[in-house]
Amino acid sequence: DGKDGVANGSAELWAKVSPDTVTYNSLLENLAHSPEGLDSALEILATLEEKYDETGDKRIKPNIRTVNQVINSYAKHSANLSTKGYYKTKEEVEEAWNLAEKARTLLDNMKQRYEETGDDDFKPDAATYTTCCDAYARVGTVEAAKRADELLEEMEQSEHVNPNFRTFTAVITAWAKAPGKRSAVRAEEILQKMEDLHARAVKSGKRHNAFNSVQPNARTYTSVINAWARSRDPTKPQRALKILKKMIDLSKGGDESATPTVYSYNAAIDACARCQGTGEQQVQALKIAFAINKALIAADGVEPNGSTFGNLIRCAQYLIPAGDERNSVCKAVFQSAIKAGQVDRGVLRALQAAADRSLFDEVAGVTVDKMGHVQYDAIPFEWRKHANTA
């Protein structure tokens, strides 16, 4: 009412208001998205646990959602260590690993409390496990991927919690980022398990989350394509193309969740650019890359972006010997990027690395200063008007 400088009630009434678990959980959720939020989240959790143990006040009783938000803070903090999804130094990898292990410790603590008390407020749920798997996925090592896989297996054997598509996708992502000989194979094995579970559910007519929520979506399939792209298998262009075709077929069959995104197409083109097989295998990889690009252009609701053009130029760099043919392909792709307004720094860097300097000066000379240095800020607006330059 505004009297005595107090709005919406008396000072006495407001004095009785105090935050409860819901309030703290909301605060923790916001802190998880803050680069500096981890320390505050840990402090809040410790304070809540201490106060609840002292008073037994159920209004401030920390529950599994409370812990889930703190685990999410660990995962988000790990993500903030890198700018491109991977870590540059051994120290960054170690810190990401330590964060994932601390998240796992919180999960184990809640499991123990639930086993000791039987209190459902302490029972880990799918989000608890999935967020831990996500934290391990951000490490980018085989050991971390194995830890995420162990959590998935634990869920599959549990009577209290079942993995959903987010859990499976997080574990697939962990394998996609792990530079191991069998990483891509394992990622596709998990995808196959998801497809089998979903098919079984559809056939049986069951409609409960234990089965229906494991249906793979575009992100799941794209993660498996990424796993093959990062593998050393010389047949990875064909494997990536096979998965992309499956996504397209599923989409045409009515499964909109499997519709390929631009990231799916880009991942498949990237698999081609990374092919290090024989000369014939590289020729096939180049053909596959441009066939994928053609399919992307023809697809409804999706357009090539800067990464598409950059990956195609990288295909030319790695799959075509230096010379006129490579220059011709680079020029054509770059001109298409200009026409699409998708020339970002990545496209310009790719052209600079792949083409002869004479060709670069011919098609992108406007970005070169008097000293011969490329100025990315000089990319004309018309060239970059649709590019994501954030």
Image: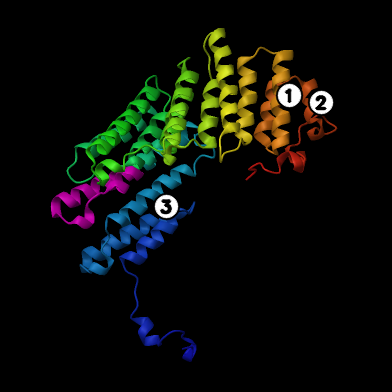
Image point (36%, 32%), residue name: 144
Q: Which one is in front, 112 or 166?
A: 166
Mark number, residue 362 = 2
In this view, 317 is above or below 105: above
Near mark 2 (Cα within 10 A), the count class, few <14, some 14-19 or many ≥20, is few
Q: How far apart are marks 3 and 2 (CA)?
A: 50 Å
Identity of the residue furthest to the right in this view = 370
Q: Position of residue 242 (x, y in %)?
A: 45, 23
Q: What residue type is labelled 2?
A: Glu
Image point (73%, 24%), residue name: 331
Near mark 3 (Cα within 10 A), the count class, few <14, some 14-19 or many ≥20, is many
Q: Position of residue 277 (x, y in %)?
A: 52, 11
Residue wearing tag 1:
331
Number of numbered discs: 3
Image point (42%, 29%), residue name: 224
Q: Which one is in front, 245 or 277?
A: 245
Q: Distance between the residues labelled 1 and 3?
A: 47 Å
- Does label 1 or label 3 sit earlier along the sequence? 3
The kind of secondary structure element at disc 1 is helix
- Whether residue 338 sits left or right of residue 1 in the image: it is right
Q: Is residue 230 visible?
A: no
Q: What residue type is labelled 1?
A: Lys
Tell me whether the residue at label 1 lies in contact with that at label 3, contact meaning CB atoms closer than 8 angstroms: no
Q: Is residue 354 visible?
A: yes
- Does label 3 or label 2 sit earlier along the sequence? 3
Residue wearing tag 3:
38
In this view, 357 is above or below 220: above
Task: Tell me the magenta residue range.
Answer: 102-131
Q: Which one is in front, 78 or 226?
A: 226
Q: Position of residue 39 (x, y in %)?
A: 41, 54
Say whether residue 109 is magenta: yes
Where residue 19 sits, quadrant-wise, is bottom left
